[in-house]
Amino acid sequence: MLYQIIPLEIGSIVEREIFRKANMEIKCGLVWKLGSVLTPHKPAFLKTYNPALGICLEDIKGAQISDTYNGEKVIYFSETVPDDLQEELTDIFYGISQKYSGPHQAVFEDLDWTLEKVESFIFGQLEVKELKEELASYK
């Protein structure tokens, strides 16, 4: 049996990377407008789940992001990142830099930023559906 976890609010699935360098931090990633999470294990987190806080997918046994639609790239900086550096890093992240090319992760690491963490979250009100495994293979 597979279980599909569906956030009922737009933008409730987030994939985030955290980069650090000295006392500076970048949080960037994707916010999916629509999507779902699949797991072969019956979700046990629902009894204590707080929609305002959400849950990290690592905390849901066997969970993986499944279908996703209309992802929007977002980037945030700690207050310690100077404005001119924020502009340069934003251009790299969105792939519009004239100076650097390639995936933002590789460029950030070339610039001595360390990828500290990669996380995926869901939050908000959720619906859980039981799927027969043979039906899920058609998705």
Image (cartoon, rainbow, N blue to C red):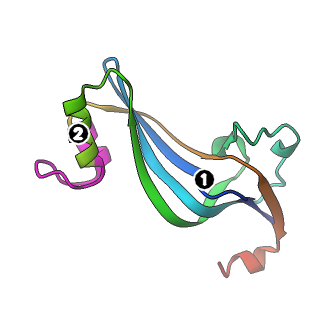
Residue 56 in percent (x, y) is at 65, 41
Q: Which residue is mark 2?
A: 87
* Relative vertical location of residue 39 with respect to residue 139 in this rendering, above or below: above
Discs 1/2, front: 2
Upstream in sequence: badge 1 or badge 2: 1
Q: Is residue 6 left or right of residue 34?
A: right
> Which one is in front, 9 or 114?
9
* Relative vertical location of residue 73 with respect to residue 28 in this rendering, above or below: below
* Residue 95 included in the magenta stretch of the image: yes
In the structure shown, which secondary structural element does the residue marked by tag 1 occupy? Answer: strand
Residue at (18% x, 53% y) in the render: 101
Which range is magenta? Answer: 93-108
In the structure shown, which secondary structural element does the residue marked by tag 2 occupy? Answer: helix
Amino acid found under the numbered disc labelled 1: Ile
Amino acid found under the numbered disc labelled 2: Glu
Q: Which residue is mark 1?
A: 13
* Residue 58 included in the magenta stretch of the image: no
Question: Main SS type for the magenta part?
Answer: loop
Residue at (31% x, 18% y) in the render: 22
Residue 112 in percent (x, y) is at 24, 30
Residue at (11% x, 48% y) in the render: 99
Residue at (76% x, 80% y) in the render: 135
Residue 38 in percent (x, y) is at 70, 61
Q: Residue furthest left?
A: 99
